[in-house]
Image (cartoon, grey):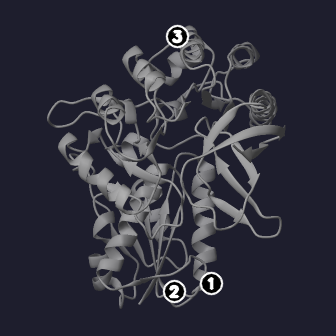
């Protein structure tokens, strides 16, 4: 039987989908491209915003139109948070929660001939940690290795703790085995991933700093990229190790969410704007060419013009490389949904556009600063029409260069000779 899978959302979701794909293959299923005719379709969903839910519903309906006779199963955060809503979508045959998602191949056997949508979504209290890593059947150049799951922070706008449960991590002693698997699959870059990665803590006591130190001292022929870290968890020890190590990409993604202390307090974030500002400057002092990405939420309840201006001025000041700007959307069962003074939707969108314009300027400035520098890339996607490769550098700059299609997918040094908007142009050195 042919199975197609599709992933929405975070890097952890991608790793989990890959793990599920491997389970299907081990049982004798054939993995086929999503959107082609399939016997079974599995969609791994996100639910971080209302837009994520809307996108999931669109994908579900589109998939059913492409394969009207296929069994269509939905898993992930949207399925866990709103199983009845997902089950009500026309064409959905099965809904799987977080506890059930890695048992989907076996559960499907019981559902294939069912006439009604089957819902397997249970309580997420005391969920065990489930390892996930992309494997050699994945088309991506870089591997995503899930080392941590869940979150204990309960920010007032966020559904993730309710969708994924409490923080839990892989046992430290199992990490080498997972990295050996990545190497054996031929990858050269691994993104260490988690829902709140900096909160990694092994059952045997090792924390995220221990993990970073272990990687820096390892002999793996890999480069490591840290997916995202809460600012209060990026400590001086981690920064020092990354700065001195040739194993780690010089790239951090650090959520800010707001540059106003009033709004940060309402969001139940664990730092102040001044701390975030100083952290970014500290990173650039230790690693001058480091790429720094930022998450920002615009239009949180009670966000006045003054609060937004504080956010804008902070982001204008700090030497960041790009932003992911999210328009606040009300999420059921979160404290913020009941907060007073909601920001009008049109004003939220206007502020979002203002910050996205600023993000474009920041990225353009960072890319321009790379001209003349030598960066390291791993060839990723090849364009046969113009014989060019596109890749990501260690500091998360999009690079294009000319070379033959037979180029080996390994570490290659390139010199940046020009930049244009969100792309740089380079030659191999």
Classify mark 2: residues with Cα within 10 Å, few (<14), some (14-19) or many (20+): many
Q: Is residue 412 above or below residue 181?
A: above
Residue at x-position 75% and y-position 46%: 427
For the N terminus, give its image quadrant.
Answer: bottom left
Residue 425 in the image, given as x and y percentages of width and height: 79, 45
Disc 2 versus disc 1: distance between alpha carbons? 9 Å
- Secondary element at image label 2: loop
2 and 1 marks in contact (CB < 8 Å): yes
In the drawing, what numbered circle is on residue 275? Answer: 3
Residue at x-position 28% and y-position 69%: 103
Residue 120 in the image, given as x and y percentages of width and height: 31, 68
Instruction: Please give the residue where the numbered disc 1 appears in the rendered image.
Output: 66
3 and 2 marks in contact (CB < 8 Å): no
Question: 170 left or right of 270?
Answer: left
Going from N to C along the chain, the mark reached first, 3 or 2, is 2
Classify mark 1: residues with Cα within 10 Å, few (<14), some (14-19) or many (20+): some
Looking at the image, how many numbered discs can be counted on the residues?
3
Question: 292 left or right of 368?
Answer: left
Residue 245 in the image, given as x and y percentages of width and height: 43, 28
- Of residue 101 and residue 328, the one placed in the foreground of this image is 101
Instruction: Please give the residue where the numbered disc 2 appears in the rendered image.
Output: 38
For the C terminus, give its image quadrant.
Answer: top right
- Of residue 312 and residue 409, the one placed in the foreground of this image is 409
| Residue 327 in sight here | no
Q: Residue furthest front?
A: 429
- Secondary element at image label 3: helix
Residue 44 in the image, given as x and y percentages of width and height: 47, 63
| Residue 390 in sight here | yes
């Amino acid at each position: 039987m042919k199975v197609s899978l599709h992933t929405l959302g975070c890097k952890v979701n991608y790793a989990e989908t890959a793990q599920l794909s491997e389970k299907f293959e081990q049982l004798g299923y054939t993995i086929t491209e999503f959107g082609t005719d399939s016997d079974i379709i599995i969609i791994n969903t996100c639910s971080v915003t209302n837009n994520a839910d809307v996108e999931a519903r669109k994908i579900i309906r589109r998939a059913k139109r492409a394969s009207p006779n296929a069994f269509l199963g939905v898993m992930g955060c949207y399925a866990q948070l709103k199983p009845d809503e997902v089950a009500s979508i026309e064409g959905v045959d099965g809904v799987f929660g977080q506890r059930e998602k890695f048992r989907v191949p076996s559960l499907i056997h019981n559902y294939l001939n069912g006439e009604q949508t089957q819902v397997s979504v249970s309580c997420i209290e005391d969920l065990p940690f489930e390892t996930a890593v992309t494997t050699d059947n994945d088309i991506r150049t870089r591997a995503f290795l899930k080392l941590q799951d869940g979150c204990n922070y309960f920010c007032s706008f966020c559904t993730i703790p309710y969708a994924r449960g409490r923080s839990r991590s892989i046992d430290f002693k199992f990490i080498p085995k997972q990295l050996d698997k990545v190497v054996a699959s031929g990858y050269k870059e691994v993104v260490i991933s988690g829902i709140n990665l900096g909160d990694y803590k092994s059952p045997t006591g090792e924390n995220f700093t221990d993990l970073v130190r272990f990687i820096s001292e390892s002999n793996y022929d890999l480069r490591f990229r840290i997916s995202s870290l809460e600012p209060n968890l990026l400590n001086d020890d981690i920064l020092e190790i990354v700065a001195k190590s040739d194993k780690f990409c010089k790239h951090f993604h650090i959520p800010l969410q707001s540059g106003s202390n009033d709004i940060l307090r309402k969001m139940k974030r664990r730092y102040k704007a001044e701390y975030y500002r100083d952290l970014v400057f500290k990173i650039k002092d230790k690693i001058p060419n480091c790429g720094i990405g930022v998450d920002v939420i615009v239009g949180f309840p009670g966000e006045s013009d003054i609060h937004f201006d504080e956010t804008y001025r902070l982001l204008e000041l700090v030497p960041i490389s790009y932003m992911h700007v999210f328009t606040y959307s009300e999420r059921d069962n979160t404290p913020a949904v009941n907060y007073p003074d909601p920001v009008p939707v049109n004003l939220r969108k206007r502020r979002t556009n203002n910050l996205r314009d600023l993000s474009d300027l920041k990225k353009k400035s960072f890319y321009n600063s790379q001209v003349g520098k030598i960066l390291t890339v791993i060839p990723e996607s090849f364009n046969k029409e113009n014989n060019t490769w596109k890749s990501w550098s260690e500091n998360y700059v999009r690079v294009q260069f000319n070379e033959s299609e037979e180029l080996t997918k390994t570490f290659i040094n390139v010199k940046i000779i020009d930049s244009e908007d969100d792309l740089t142009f380079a030659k191999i050195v």
